Amino acid sequence: MKKHVFIIGLILLLGPCKISAQTPALAFTSACANSSSLSGNSWSSTPAYQCDLPETSTAGDTLIFSFGFDGTGGNQNFTVSDDKGDTFTLDVSSAISNNKQLRIYRAVNIAAGATYVRVTLNGGQLNGYWQPTVSEFYGAAVLDASSCATGTSTSVTAGSLAPTTAGDLLYQVSYSASSSSETSFAVGSQSNIAWAFAFQLHGDGAAAQYGVYSSTSAINPTFTQGTSNSFISCAVALKASAAGSAPALLPRVVHQTHDAMPKNAANPWNIGAISTGDTVYFAYVGNDAISSITSNPSPTVVNWTASGADFVGLNGHNHVNFYCAKFSSPPGPLTISLTRTATTNDSINMIYDVVGGTCNLDADSGGQAGNSASAATSLTICSGCITPTKLNDFILADGGQAFCTATSLITPATNFDTGWFQGNNISGPSQTDENNFWAHFRNANLNAITVTVQDTCGGSAIANWAARVAAYQSSVSTGAPQPPTGLTAIVH
C-alpha cells in the first residue's frame, strides 16, 4: 500500500504529462479557379462553390480556407462547411476594395476523411468572382494574430501582426481586387522566416505563402508580384501545437492547381504551379489540341511527355491529354508554358504535384468519347478501358462534356478533383471546372478499371463527351500478388 501512495504522490508532484508542440508543416493545398463574372447567365437558387481536397483529410489537422468574392451590395451571408461536419471559424476579413473582399476561415482538430470544403451564399446579392482555396496543416491550431491590407504595387503586403509566441505558422494569401492576371510571383525574403508558396495562380492574380516565424517581433508578411496590380491580402499566425500528424499515403498529391484559361487567351499560355514532390502531372481538357508544353525551370529527369497521342471528342472538341515531368530536385515555384494549335475557347489546366510518383506509364486508355442524348444523372467514361499491371499506380481520369456538371465519383468512390460552382445554372459557363471533370486514385488490385462520374443535369442530356484514363507507376508500385513461399507439402 505504501508503494501505491508513493507513486500517486510522485504523479501529483510532477503534474500531468505535457505533449510538446511540433513544428507546423503543410500536408497539402488546393487552389480553385476564380469563378469570374456571372453576367448573362441564370443564377442558381442555392449558389455554392465546392473546392475539393487533393487528398482526404487527416484527423487532428487544421484547414485554412481563404475566400475572395465581389461584395457589391455589402449584404452577403456565407456558410463554410465540409463533408465531415467540421466547424469553420472566420479569423479575419479584409476591408472592401473595388467592391472585392477577402476572408480567411479555419477549422481545427478536423475529422479524418473530409474530401471537400464548400462555401454557400445563404442570403444577399450574388455578384461572382468567387475564389476559394484550401490548405491543410499539422502542428498548428490556435489563432495568435491576424491582419489584412489592400494596395496597388508589386509588393503584396498583409499588414503588421505581432505573434505572442515564437514558432507560429504564418499564412498569407492574396486576391486580385482588379481581377487581373499576373506574370509572376516571388516568395518573400524577411528575417526569422523562410517563406514557401502554397499556391500561385497567374491567370487569377492570386497566390499564398507560408512559413514558421521564429520571433515575436511585429512582421508585415510580404511577397512580390510581377505587375503592379490592385490586391487584397490577409495573413494569420497560428500557434504551434501537438495537434495533427503528417500524411503517410504514397503516392499523394501535395499541391493541386486549377488554372483557368479564358477564351482567346495568350498563346502560349503561362501557368503558375508548385513542385515540392518528385513528379508533376498536367491533366488537360480543352477545345484545342496541345502543340507543346515547356516549363521554367525545365525538368531534369523526364521532360514534359504525353501519355499518348492527342484524343478529341466526336464533335471535334474536348481534347484530353496527360503529360508528366520529373525533377531530380523539386524547384518549388515553376511556370508552365502551354502552346495550343488555336485559342477557340476556355479550358481548365489541372496540375498535380505528387510525392511518390513517376513518369513510368503503366497503361493509357487513349481516349473515349460518346454522345449521351438522354437525360442522365451519371456518366461512365471508362468501362474496363485500362488494366494496370502494377499495384498502387497513380491513376488520373479527366474529361469534358457539353452540358451538366460532374459533382463526384461513383466508381471508384474516391478522390474527385473537380471544383464546381453553382452560381450559374447547372450547365452555365464560368471560369471554373464546370462541364469538365478530373479525378485521381490508386489501385489496390490488378482488375480492369471502370470510372463513373455523378452528374447534375436538371433533366438535361449530357450530349457530346470525351474522356481519358491513364495509370502511372508510383515509387511504391508493386507487381501482382505472389503466392506464399516456404510451404511444405504433406503427403498422406
Image (spheres, rainbow, N blue to C red):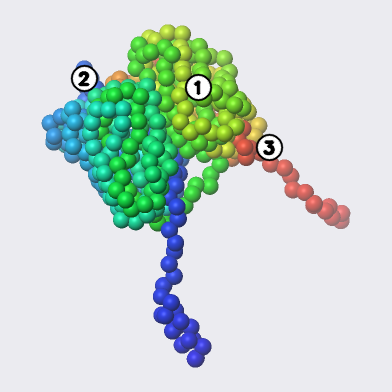
Q: Amino acid at mark 2?
A: Ser
Q: Residue drawn at (49%, 49%), measured in percent from left and top?
A: 246
Kind of residue at disc 3: Gly
In this picture, residue 101 sits left or right of residue 238: left
- What residue sits right under mark 1 in the picture? 295
Q: Nearer the viewer, residue 375 or 382?
A: 382
At label 3, counting other C-alpha atoms closer than 10 Å, the crowd grade (few under 14, some 14-19, many 20 or more) is few
Residue linked to disc 2? 39
The answer for how far apart the CA atoms under marks 2 and 1 are is 35 Å
Name the residue: 66% across, 38% down.
Answer: 478
The quarter of the image holding the C terminus is: bottom right
Determine whether 13 is above or below 489 in the image. Answer: below
Residue 479, numbered label: 3
Query: Foreground: 138 or 79?
Result: 138
Q: Is residue 356 visible?
A: yes
Corner quadrant of residue 470: top right
Q: Secondary structure at mark 1?
A: strand
Please state the horizontal and vertical placement of residue 18, each as a whole percent of the image. 43, 67
Q: Nearer the viewer, mark 1 or mark 3?
A: 1
Left or right of 263: which side holds 326? Answer: right
Mark 1 and mark 3: Cα distance apart in space: 33 Å
* Secondary structure found at label 3: loop
Left or right: residue 352 versus residue 263 is right
Q: What is the crowding at mark 2: few (fewer than 14 residues within 10 Å), some, or many (at least 20)?
A: few
Q: Are marks 2 and 1 in contact (CB under 8 Å)?
A: no
Q: Residues within 10 Å of mark 1 (few under 14, many from 20)?
A: some
Three-letter amino acid code at disc 1? Ser
- Where residue 474 sits: x, y (%)? 60, 35
